[in-house]
């Protein structure tokens, strides 16, 4: 991204974190798929559900232009905090919820693809919001 110099270091750190997390979880999920622990349909459903959750959780990013530093920065808003709290609650109980239908390696593979989708959804949403702010600033 040529516009990287206009991004606050914390926004850049989020991009890197989401990219690494998504790549790592997808790689492990593919391993579980290749080993036959999870079916294509399960992986597809988990990734799709993760993307939906990621787009919703991505709403927690309140991306603004900081005139003083001439940079894009991120802050939380009240609605975003409610979504983030709901997401954290889900993360804590996902094994109990999904453990009703899946078990063992199948559950692990499903959760990896679900989390990968969440990270990808958050990454796409963050990128979209940052580009919107930069375009508004004419950059």
Image: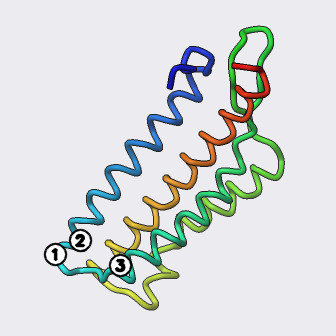
Residue 15 vertical placement versus 56 (above, below): above
Please report whichever mark, 3 or 2, sits nearer to the chain's N-terminal start: 2
Question: Residue 32 has which mark?
Answer: 2
Point out residue 105 in the picture as x, y percentages from the top left corner: 26, 78
Judge by depth and name the residue closer to the eye, 17 or 97.
17
Q: Residue at point 51% right, 71% down? A: 48
Q: How is the image coloured?
A: rainbow
Q: In the rendered picture of this protein, how many numbered marks are placed on residues?
A: 3
**Which residue is label 3 attached to?**
107
Where is residue 13? Give x, y as percent.
50, 30
Task: Report helix, strand or loop for mark 3.
Answer: helix
For residue 20, above or below residue 94 = above
In the rendering, at what x and y percent does residue 89 appear? 62, 65
For this orientation, the residue located farthest to the right is 78
Residue at 54 percent of width and 72 percent of height: 49
Looking at the picture, does residue 11 appear above or below residue 116? Answer: above
Using residue 28 as the reference point, say whether residue 91 is left or right of it: right
Residue under numbered circle 1: 35
Q: Evaluate if marks 2 and 1 touch, with contact meaning CB atoms under 8 Å apart.
A: yes
Q: Which mark is nearer the camera, 1 or 3?
A: 1
Q: Quadrant of residue 38?
A: bottom left
Dot 3 crowding, Cα within 10 Å, few <14, some 14–19, many 20+: some
Q: Position of residue 139 (x, y in %)?
A: 69, 19
Q: Are marks 3 and 2 in contact (CB under 8 Å)?
A: no
Residues at marks 1 and 3, CA–CA distance in whole angstroms: 14 Å
Q: Secondary structure at mark 1?
A: loop
Question: Helix, strand or loop at disc 2?
Answer: helix
Residue 15, numbered circle: none
Q: Residue furthest bottom?
A: 101
């Amino acid at each position: 991204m040529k516009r990287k110099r206009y991004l606050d270091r914390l926004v850049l750190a989020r991009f890197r974190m989401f990219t690494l997390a998504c790549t790592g979880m997808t790689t492990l999920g593919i391993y579980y798929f290749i080993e036959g622990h999870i079916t294509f349909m399960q992986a597809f459903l988990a990734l799709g559900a993760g993307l939906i959750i990621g787009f919703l959780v991505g709403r927690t990013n309140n991306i603004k232009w900081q005139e003083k530093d001439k940079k894009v920065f991120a802050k939380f808003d009240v609605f975003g905090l409610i979504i983030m709290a709901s997401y954290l609650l889900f993360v804590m109980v996902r094994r109990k919820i999904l453990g009703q239908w899946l078990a063992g390696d199948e559950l692990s593979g499903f959760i990896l693809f679900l989390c990968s989708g969440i990270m990808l959804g958050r990454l796409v949403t963050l990128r979209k919001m940052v580009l919107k702010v930069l375009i508004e600033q004419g950059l």
